[in-house]
Amino acid sequence: MQNVVLIIHLLLALSLIGAVLLQRSEGGGLGMGGGGGGAVSGRSAATALGKLTWVLAIAFICTSITLTILAAQNSAGSSVLDRLGDAPAPAAETTEPEGSDLLPPTDGDTPLVPRAD
């Protein structure tokens, strides 16, 4: 279920990016003149592309909320702090000195020699 919602979410994201990039720039957001027609009126006419952008944005937010709810259900109420008790013992509590695995073998240890079998 979560994978299906995630794929729909990604398709909506790509569609929303495309719809926003296809729209005409109004109001000169980068300091460029966008024409005098839209500057006089307080609200411009809603185009089909503008309505499609709103629909895609609402669907994107709905899938975001759905993915959040699904992730919360899958977490099973566990916290990162709850998992700290399962961590291995720190190096200070072990009997071997710190970094002993990096030291060369002593006389009594047989070194591991690679073999080609």
Image (cartoon, grey):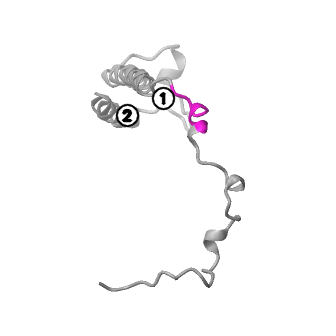
The circle on residue 13 is 2
Q: Is residue 69 above or below residue 114?
A: above
Where residue 65 sits in the image (x, y, percent)?
A: 43, 21
Frontmost of labels 1 and 2 is: 2
Closer to the chain start, of discs 1 and 2, is 2
State which quadrant residue 103 falls in.
bottom right
Q: Which residues are magenta?
A: 78-85
Give the spatial CA distance, label 1 vs label 2.
22 Å
Q: Identify the residue at image location x=53%, y=13%.
A: 42
The residue singled out by tag 1 in the image is 26
Residue 34: image location, x then y, percent = 50, 32
Left/right of residue 49 with respect to residue 92 in the rendered view: left
Q: Nearer the viewer, residue 115 or 16?
A: 115
In the image, 88: left or right of 15?
right
SS under mark 2: helix
Q: Residue furthest front?
A: 108
Disc ID at residue 71? none
